[in-house]
């Protein structure tokens, strides 16, 4: 497929930046030398072709290659499996129907896919897979020039038929052929353009954006699962605002996440004519900036999606009260329901649907806190209702403050610090209260050979002190300590004097 003459010309990329990208790429290739050399040698010896391809080459050139390596080969899947036997630590079938075999070698996770040349049925939901016979043919059916790159092995010949390296250095997402043809073949690619804009911070070429705008409704033929997977990656990218704005601007969002564009031109609860859509994108960015507070750090889809959906109930609940006041009563409850409905339509797993919609439902709860008026039981209930989502709720609630009034923002932040401190203090107190000695009353009576009475209580208290001093103990140590204590007690002495 020859590059189209309609393609918008971009300013030339300076040579030194191109060569810097190549140097980075070579450095990354050297880092993965053992894997690629060994695979290259094995496949060549068997008379097959193999090349590092797609995202792996792109990421190597950007100096951000992870531990996943994608290869493409002339060998059919059964042959790939045989060629990997004895080399890989493990192999598995990722999708024989799609010609992909997975393998692990040390820390590397490898995917090897047989050359493809997809046949597209107009209006079909999925491309039909047929095997191709050349690397060039395989690259021709790829989505963007920056993904249509390969390095043939074992000779390490760089293959770049569509100027992908130039686009990579310029930071542009462009289709190898006419975007209309590409999106006709697989409309999911429109969403992938936005996903890579989010992941890489690249600009989408104007002719590609135009095609997305004109063809947005074609996304409806794509399965919910494929859309979901790209949407998740978009939201987990480093630049989700760029990706989401592109979805909204091109009209793609009207089909896959209509709640988002509907937030435009809404009015916020402080009856200022602030755009809820703009507020939402800022809340998302602020939430991302707080992800480091999560036990596992970020990026975290649940937190990000909850930040994005937290106000989707506003358009439906907006009321204009007499006197010009605008209210959004119960928008958090309505929003939680809308969120769950959207996530169900996109076939998200139940636990994720519950987590995100719960966060949306709880995002306003803190607003009753004022400057700390809650009782301990209200604080406890807040923590209990959030349950395992508490860390994320802290983030979403803190992020949901976009006022430009610095004093107000600082006051809100202090109030939330205060609430978090109280939650922690109460939790610590409660934990203390739950601490029991290592032996219970029955065991104490049995060991000391005594009847129920105040002595049992004293022994119990002593063992509690012992446990608080020394931490948890095994039963034998606790028993010895009990007996040691017992010998010092007047009751013991008395009993022994009498003898
Ligand atoms: P990531 O690192 O996020 O996985 P990736 O580039 O590897 O990025 P994948 O979705 O894993 O993205 O796809 C692997 C490669 O397969 C891409 O680089 C691209 O060349 C090709 N590809 C994937 N999906 C499509 C598609 N719908 N149409 C055309 N080519 C595609
Ligand atoms: Mg990949």
Image: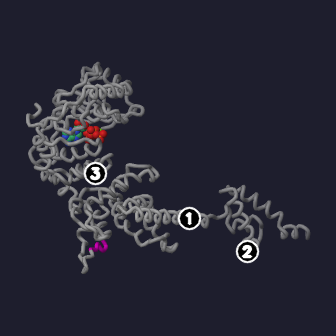
- Dot 2 or dot 1: first in sequence order is 1
Report whether 339 appears left or right of 286. Answer: left
- Please, is residue 152 above or below residue 94 in the view? above
| Front position in the image: 193 or 408 | 408
* The N terminus sits in image quarter: top left
Taking the spot 30% from the left edge, 31% from the top edge, the residue there is 61
- Residue furthest out toward the bottom: 322
Horizontally, residue 132 falls left or right of residue 341, namely left
Instruction: Name the foreground residue: 220 vs 117.
Output: 220
* Mark 3 → mark 1, Cα distance in angstroms: 37 Å
* Mark seen at residue 452: 2
Q: Nearer the viewer, mark 3 or mark 1?
A: 3
Image depth: mark 2 or mark 1 in front = 1
* Residue 97 visible in the current orientation: no
Question: Residue 434's mark?
Answer: none
Name the residue that disc number 3 marks. Answer: 241
Position of 99 with respect to 119 (left or right) is right
**Magenta region:** 326-330
Q: Is residue 377 above or below residue 114?
A: below
Q: For mark 1, what is the residue?
A: 425
Q: Residues within 10 Å of mark 1 (few under 14, many from 20)?
A: few
């Amino acid at each position: 497929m020859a590059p189209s003459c309609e393609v918008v010309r971009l300013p030339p990329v300076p040579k030194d930046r191109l060569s810097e990208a190549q140097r980075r790429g070579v450095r990354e290739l050297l880092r993965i030398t053992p894997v690629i050399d060994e695979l290259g040698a094995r496949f060549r010896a068997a008379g097959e072709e193999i090349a590092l391809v797609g995202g792996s080459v792109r990421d190597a050139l950007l100096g951000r290659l992870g531990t996943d390596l994608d290869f493409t080969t002339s060998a059919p899947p059964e042959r790939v499996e045989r060629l990997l036997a004895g080399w890989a630590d493990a192999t598995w079938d990722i999708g024989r129907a799609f010609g992909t075999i997975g393998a692990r070698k040390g820390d590397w996770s490898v995917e090897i896919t047989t050359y493809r040349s997809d046949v597209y049925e107009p209006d079909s939901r999925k491309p039909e897979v047929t095997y191709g016979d050349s690397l060039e043919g395989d690259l021709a059916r790829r989505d963007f020039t920056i993904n249509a790159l390969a390095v043939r092995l074992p000779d390490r010949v760089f293959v770049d038929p569509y100027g992908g390296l130039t686009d990579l250095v310029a930071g542009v997402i462009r289709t190898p052929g006419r975007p209309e043809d590409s999106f006709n073949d697989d409309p999911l690619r429109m969403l992938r353009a936005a996903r890579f804009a989010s992941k890489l911070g690249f600009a989408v070429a104007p002719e590609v954006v135009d095609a997305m705008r004109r063809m947005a409704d074609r996304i409806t033929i794509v399965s919910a699962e494929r859309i979901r997977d790209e949407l998740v990656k978009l939201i987990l990218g480093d630049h989700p605002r760029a990706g989401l704005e592109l979805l909204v601007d091109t009209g793609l969002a009207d089909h896959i996440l209509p709640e988002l564009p509907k937030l435009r031109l809404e009015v916020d609860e402080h009856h200022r004519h602030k755009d809820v859509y703009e507020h939402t994108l800022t809340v998302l960015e602020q939430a991302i900036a707080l992800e480091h507070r999560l036990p596992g750090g970020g990026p975290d889809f649940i937190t990000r999606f909850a930040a994005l959906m937290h106000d989707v109930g506003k358009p439906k609940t907006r009321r204009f009260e007499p006197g010009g006041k605008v209210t959004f009563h119960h928008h958090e409850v309505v929003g939680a329901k809308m969120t769950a409905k959207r996530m169900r339509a996109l076939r998200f797993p139940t636990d994720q649907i519950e987590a995100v919609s719960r966060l949306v439902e709880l995002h306003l709860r803190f607003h009753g806190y004022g400057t700390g008026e809650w009782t301990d039981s209200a604080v406890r209930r807040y923590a209990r209702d959030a349950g395992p989502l508490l860390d994320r709720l802290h983030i979403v609630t803190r992020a949901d403050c976009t006022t430009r009034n610095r004093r107000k923002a600082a006051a809100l932040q202090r109030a939330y610090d205060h609430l978090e401190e109280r939650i922690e203090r109460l939790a610590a107190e409660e934990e203390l209260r739950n601490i029991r000695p290592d032996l219970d009353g029955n065991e104490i009576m049995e060991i000391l050979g005594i009847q129920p009475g105040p002595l049992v209580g004293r022994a119990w208290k002593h063992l509690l002190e012992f446990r608080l001093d020394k931490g948890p103990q095994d039963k034998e140590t606790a028993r010895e300590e009990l007996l040691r204590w017992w010998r010092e007690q007047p009751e013991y002495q008395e009993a022994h004097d009498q003898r």
